[in-house]
Amino acid sequence: MMANEPGLARPDPASTYDVPRLADGEIHVWRLDLGLLSGLEPRLAGVLSAEEERRSGRFVHERDRAFYIAGRSALRHLLSGYVGVPPEEVPLRIGAHGKPFLDGELRLHFNLSHSAGLALLAVTEVSPVGVDVERVGPIPELEAIAARFFTAGEAREIRMARATEQRRLFFNCWTRKEAYLKAVGGGLSIPLSSVELTVSGEPRLLAIAGDRSAAGQWSLRHLRPAPGYVGALAAPATGYRVRRLSWAGPGTGNTAPRAA
Ligand SMILES: CC(C)(COP(=O)(O)OP(=O)(O)OC[C@H]1O[C@@H](n2cnc3c(N)ncnc32)[C@H](O)[C@@H]1OP(=O)(O)O)[C@@H](O)C(=O)NCCC(=O)NCCS
């Protein structure tokens, strides 16, 4: 749906909510500091659905529960700005393999990823989108994991890299693949090795299930949301612009551009 379609009665997001307008061909990537947002819980809370509340009650560790509530509440607050309904009324639904989507809002796509207190939320009307973020840390058996889950070419490039480079390439490869799987919506029901991509240099899909022309319909972006973290964005589209934003809670209007 177009933002100005009659009958939708969307508010002007720039003035009413915390989100800037989505320009044509634009993907917004929001950075969320879940530690900071979980400190605002009283202001963020009260917007989760009954199912989300139930899920939050199932976390064993209090910090995981707080991060989940912060992430979900932020998701609802930010999406409310795009669709023009209160956060608690944002019609979040879950797809067959767990990908959340907006009921009825067919043109607005989004995807969320979180790792070690940092979350990224991608929002766009361009196409379905997938985002992944990981905190870069030691991976025991890195070469064995690469050999098991990546394509032979990707695993070889990682194995041949200098020891100091291996971790960076591994996380490039992992986040790029997960971003793709999340854009498709299948998650890990799709083997990571079914998609072949670059692990260094310009991020690019090379083949999808062996099909090189299908890969050409996609683009990948490398994201560096914070020191020690790496991320990737995937979409079955080319030529879009990524606008990087961060959000520090309701009413803060944090739309300042940030470093990639
Ligand atoms: C979707 C999937 C690939 C997410 O992987 P992940 O890296 O663990 O988690 P992320 O933080 O990136 O993504 C989780 C979010 O993606 C969204 N999501 C869930 N299923 C999804 C799917 N099938 N497609 C797209 N997005 C999905 C949800 O918003 C979820 O957030 P929530 O848990 O707060 O609801 C999941 O299917 C999975 O099984 N992951 C396990 C991956 C793993 O073992 N990672 C080790 C890293 S080294």
Image (cartoon, rainbow, N blue to C red):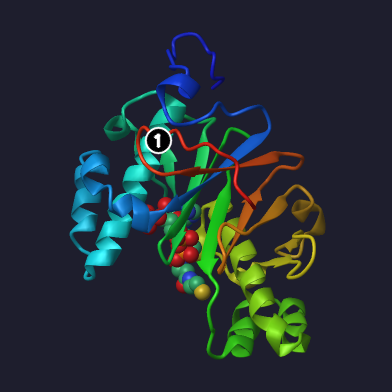
What percent of the width, then of the height, locates residue 118? Answer: 45, 59
Measuring 31% from the left and 27% from the top, which residue is drawn there?
86
Quadrant for ligand 1 reads: bottom left
Residue 250, image quadrant: top left
Residue 117, image quadrant: bottom left
What percent of the width, then of the height, locates residue 169? Answer: 69, 75
On screen, residue 26 versus residue 21, left or right, reads right
The answer to whether 100 is drawn above or below residue 186 in the figure is above
Ligand 1 has an atom within 8 Å of the beta carbon of the residue at disc 1: no
On screen, residue 47 versus residue 234, left or right, reads left
The answer to whether 68 is drawn above or below residue 139 in the figure is above
Residue 128, image quadrant: top right
Secondary structure at numbered mark 1? loop
Q: Is residue 103 visible?
A: no
244 or 200: nearer the eye? Answer: 244
Measuring 79% from the left and 60% from the top, which residue is drawn there?
202
**Which quadrant would the N terminus be assigned to in this image?**
top right
What percent of the width, then of the height, locates residue 213? Answer: 81, 53
Measuring 53% from the left and 29% from the top, which residue is drawn there?
20
Q: How many marks?
A: 1
For the residue marked with disc 1, what is the amino acid?
A: Thr
Q: Is residue 64 visible?
A: yes
Which residue was labeled with disc 1? Answer: 252
What percent of the width, then of the height, locates residue 191? Answer: 58, 69
On screen, residue 99 versus residue 66, left or right, reads right
10 Å crowding of disc 1: few (<14), some (14-19), many (20+): few
